[in-house]
Amino acid sequence: MIRILIFLGAVFALGLGFAWLADRPGEMVVTFNGYQYQVSLMVAAVAIVAVVAAVMIVWWLIKSLWNSPYTISRYFRVRRRDRGYQALSTGMIAAGAGDGALARKKTKEAAKLIRSDQEPLIQLLEAQASLLEGDHEGAREKFEAMLDDPEMRLLGLRGLYLEAERLGDRNAARHYAGRAASVAPQLAWAAESTLEDLTGRGDWDGALKLVEAQKSTRQIERDAANRRRAVLLTAKAQALTDSDPNAAKAAALEANKLAPDFAPAAVAAANLLFKQNDVRKGSKILEAAWKAEPHPEIAELYTHARPGDAVVDRLNRAKKLQELKRNNAESSMTVARAALDAQDFSTARREAEAAIRMDRREGAYLLLADIEEAETGDQGKIRQLLSKAVRAPRDPAWVADGVVSERWAPVSPVSGKLDAFAWRAPMERLGQLIDSHEDEADVPVLAAPAKPTKEAEVIDHPAVAKTISEAPTEPKPAVGDDQVTPVTAAAFAAIPNDAEPVEPAEELARLPDDPGVDPDDEAEKSPRRFRLF
């Protein structure tokens, strides 16, 4: 648009100039070689303009003829390059779509039209085509050739890293990732693999430096970086607990400052403070962590902060934790354990039952069984509680990649991933899966017996029970193994006189202290489906 305006302005100025000359008549006289030429001023101006235009046209023609070989060669070169880039683009799309044959065809076509030293993407397309064809050895050779080119070095390292991961060679993969991280620390894949290598070797200081570099390059968010630093500092504190307690304490306190709700950091920091007789500061750290998330390791360390305390003092400290986090199953179990140690059975039983009401899990039933054994020794109730514990969900534990550990660890023993352990309940037992509602859908439901209109006499005789069970008119209720089927007198009278007598079956001996079915549980159970176990 600007060029058009400039052109129109020049034409307008030229027209004004000719109009100005036309309004001012005059003559121009030129003497040359004894001759005198006299023309009007307008004619002279037109002649000058025509001569300048003719000179410019002649100069353009001469220049075009002079540059025509270069212009023609450049035209064909540009056309060849465009065809090459078109083939390269089609090949990259084919490689992304998984069409190895088309990718290989376009690779050869692009290599003929464009030199590989001018366009590095041709090397990448060749490597991708080899991978699609299953020629992994050829692909590795192409990736290794890229290492000599500074522009392609990172791409070659990435390809070799992925090939090493595919083959399961972690050492080689971490080697290539380390080389890439030294050249370009901003690469996330290289930094993550190098971090796994450092943590696997226990180089916590090197891992901390790498996390700091990731934070400075904004590879990870600030909160994620603080979490990783807390995990690494906690691991460092655990490693230096015996060799350098002061350095371990400094690392643990920094970890707790970065993540106050991280239970392993709080436990490590408080433990080191307790060893240095700083009970007050260590207790505050544990109390803050308990408010954020109750954990049994925190409760255990808090109640035993002073080894010389009496059991009553430990019970008081457990109650203090309960005040910090009320209506929590872990708080109630902590008080119940301390009360059991203090022989305060009423408090222990009350808190254990409260924990079961809030969270029915294995540990709560086992704790209640311990209380029952210590207080009454009733083996029947103890067995009943143990059977409930077997069927109850498992207690939370440190779980990472299917591995259940009693203690926290900074990395997963399976994948080597940092901060993989999480505090959660492991997978349920097989019995819980069998008792699930999905399995109950395939099990037939037994109908409840009809309520008799008249109360009848109950006779306990095996022969009568067998005859009644075979009668089609009376439905059979679902009963347990230790119950007796009631038989009416009318049914007993229906037995034929010529029926063979049946010897009484030998009754299984029962323990005298077995309480049988808990009345509370029996009341809670409405007519249920048939269960396998």
Image (cartoon, rainbow, N blue to C red):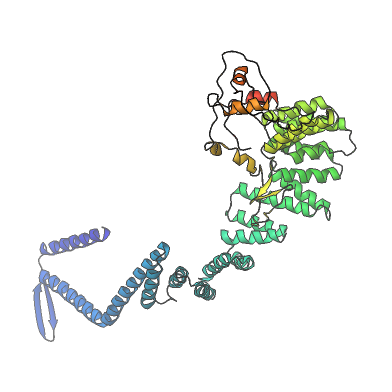
Q: Is residue 511 above or below residue 238?
A: above
Frontmost residue, 336 versus 460? 460
Residue 373 % position (x, y): 82, 32
Residue 77 % position (x, y): 32, 77
Residue 468 % position (x, y): 60, 25
Left of 95 or right of it: where is 198?
Answer: right
- Residue 437, image quadrant: top right
Asked whether residue 380 is in view, the answer is yes
Residue 170 % position (x, y): 63, 65
Q: Furthest-right residue in view?
A: 308
Q: Residue at x 76, y 25 (%)?
A: 350
Q: Is residue 193 above or below residue 482?
A: below
Frontmost residue, 320 versus 164? 164
Left of 340 or right of it: where is 78?
Answer: left
Asked whether residue 186 is in view, the answer is no
- Residue 461, image quadrant: top right
Q: Residue at x 16, y 60 (%)?
A: 16
Placement of the N terminus among the 4 image quadrants: bottom left
